[in-house]
Amino acid sequence: MVRTKTAVCVCSGGIDSTVAATIASQEGYKLHFFHASYGHRAEKGEKEAVEKITAYLGAKDLKFVEIPFLKELGWLWTLGTEKKRGAILAVILMW
């Protein structure tokens, strides 16, 4: 039995997730993309970027999910990158 390698790529449309997905693709993984929208200003551009990346890498599918409660944490997006990652992780762990 041949096993298919599968990767679920949580993709923002930014460079980090795009590079990770590209590496997975180059290593033979079948890609499935997931993008979470939370009502931020760059949402339209991010969705367009994710759609283009999905098509370019030949991903099997793309799922969008709305997480509106994150918009209530608007203060979070004003933090520096390292602080933001820690705060997001804390919110996820508490959820």
Image: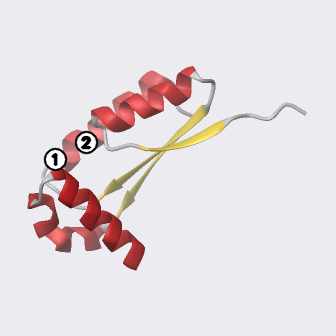
Name which quarter of the figure residue 65 lies in. Answer: bottom left
Label 1 and label 2: CA atoms lie apart by: 6 Å
SS under mark 2: helix
Instruction: Pick the quarter of the image with the N terminus.
Output: top right
Q: Is residue 59 visible?
A: yes
The answer to whether mark 1 and mark 2 are in CB contact below 8 A is: yes
Vertical arrangement, residue 4 with respect to residue 89, above or below: above
Q: Nearer the viewer, residue 24 or 31?
A: 24
SS under mark 1: loop
Instruction: Pick the quarter of the image with the C terminus.
Output: bottom left
**How many numbered circles are shown?**
2
- Counting from the top left corner in percent of width and height, residue 70 is at 26, 69
Vertical arrangement, residue 45 with respect to residue 74, above or below: above
Res 46 label = 2
Which residue is drawn at the image coordinates 14% and 59% (left, top)?
A: 77
- Say what amino acid the circle numbered 2 marks: Glu
- Say what amino acid the circle numbered 1 marks: Ala
- Counting from the top left corner in percent of width and height, residue 20 is at 44, 33
Res 75 label = none
13 relative position to 64: left or right: left
Res 42 label = 1
Name which quarter of the figure residue 40 lies in. Answer: bottom left
Which residue is drawn at the image coordinates 64% and 39% (left, top)?
A: 6
Q: Nearer the viewer, residue 3 or 62?
A: 3
Name which quarter of the figure residue 4 lies in. Answer: top right
**Which residue is farthest right?**
1
9 relative position to 5: left or right: left
